[in-house]
Image: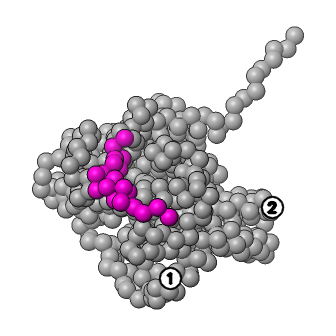
Amino acid sequence: MTQKTGKKLPRWFFAAIALGLLVLAIYFPLLQGKVPFLAYVVNGFPAWTGFTPSTEIYPVANIGDLVTQFYPYRSFAANSIRHGTLPLWNPYLLSGVTFVGNCLSAMFYPPNVLYYLIPLPAAWTAALALRLFLAAMFMWLFLKSIGTTPAGSIFGAIVFSCCGFMTIWQGQTMADASIWLPLIFYSIHRLHLDMSGRSAALIAFSYAMPVLAGMPETALYATIAGTAWFLLLWVFPSSKDRGSFDPRFMALYMGSGILAIGLAAIQIIPTLEWLKELGHVLTFTWPPNKLSHVLAFVSRDILRNPNSAGIDIPEAAAYIGMTSLLLLPVAAFHAGRKYAAFFCAMVVISVGVVYGFEPFRWVSLQIPIIKAIKNGRLVLLASFGIATLAAMGLSALEQEREEAPLRRRKVQFILVFLSFLISFLLVYELRLMTVLRVEFMRRASFSRALLILGFILIALRIWGRFPRRLFPWAACSVAAFDLVTFSYGSAGFSDPREVFPKAPVFEFLKQKEKPP
């Protein structure tokens, strides 16, 4: 008599649960009816000066655009759609300006449908939570496709979705556009393995989303990075039965690019017309970030601008988790060395351009359009690369057998120790630059404690003193604690009734408004 066995649940189901819990931990006050919005920032404007919100007031980074642009944009679009009008024109700004032509309006970005269906505070809350979840799931999907272990995929998803760049830009089009980067890489890798129309369509969709999200510069950087990834797979294919320079792979990729332009044309065309009317020319050259801002990779303080060490927030925010920096060099021992080399180059080039290292700075200044885009935004690619390498490093240690050669273990330990030493010196310099005492979990000393904890954990695993099965999940737990405590509360939480409450001056003007 045979025993019936239940159907095994797919891996994505467990990943969705784990990453869903991550979202819940970061946005836990939502269960209490709170909205991720700094309501007291509104008090800085004369119309609301007399209003006193119940929200606790604490230092905040320079994220005022959430109040002055993005939340009002979503409100205006939602009200117009509900009244059966497509908001082509915004009469409330200056003497009237285009609305749909302004890419920041993100009128046609699919997730923004939430604003047209449910009340604004609820839609704003759901959109931020959904953004974090999608960023994590897309990263998990990509990492799984290139051969990282389940724990490695979860680790990388946590790091990417909660890193400094993604955290500080939440609620803005920058983060909305950035979440699609791992899906772009996944879809190209999928096309490489399965040259079908469905795979090509997924590439087109993933390329179009950053444009529709309202951030052209992020879309451009994602397109360049994705094309470089395609070239790697085209020139150095993974499959032994497929040669280099496969014309079909190239044709499908080019076709997906054309389709992506068609999908995003609904936003591209009005934006180009608007820019033409402005007479805007991309001639200004943005300076690189200050070299001292490289300390942002180990700085947890993102609640003030500049932060306690003089780092500009949000522009320079780049925290990536202390354990990630330690696992980064171990990616060299992962089976996918070709991928490790690619992402190592991505990190080096991105960091070089962001902080003005030569020759990367000089090369970027020779490229039209690129030279006129803010260099600091390449922190996104650096964070993506580090998260990928760290996931590969964790997978390599997880798969390392107990009988691994002593020489191999020594090399791994030396690489991790060098990474620890560099990170420790960065934290030490961060401590020297800190000029004011901040919250306990935002201090340089807390970064140092997390760094030491991660080093002990990894060193024990390398020397076979930590159980093989427990190590990956212990590493994921440390990363989750590190990045959840870092991300939590960065956008504040407020009562929905205190988000742009009624202001006497506006109520007075409404009474004086003449009927149409």
Q: Residue 67 placed where, x, y %?
A: 35, 57
| 216 vs 106, nearest the viewer | 106
Q: Are marks 2 and 1 in contact (CB under 8 Å)?
A: no
89 vs 317: above or below: below
Q: Is residue 5 above or below residue 188?
A: above
Q: Residue furthest top?
A: 1
* Residue occupying the point 28% across, 56% down: 505
Quarter the N terminus occupies:
top right
Residue 327 coordinates in the image, percent (x, y): 43, 50
| Dot 1: element | helix
Helix or strand or loop: what does disc 2 sit on? loop
Left or right of 485? Residue 220 is right
The disc label shown at residue 112, or none: none
Q: Read off the residue under disc 1.
A: 275
Residue 196 is marked as 2
Q: Is residue 507 magenta?
A: yes
Q: What's the residue type where badge 1 is placed?
A: Leu
Please name the residue shown 54% across and 74% down the image. 101
Q: Which residues are magenta?
A: 497-516
Three-letter amino acid code at the position of disc 2 = Ser
Query: Is 208 rendered above or below residue 287?
Result: above
Which residue is nearer to you in this view: 42 or 388?
42
At a point 59% along the width and 47% down the height, the residue shown is: 117
The residue carrying pointer 1 sits among few (fewer than 14), some (14 to 19) or many (20 or more) residues within 10 Å by Cα, namely: few
Colour treatment of the image: one colour
Whether residue 300 appears in this view of the structure is no
Say left or right for 53 vs 378: left
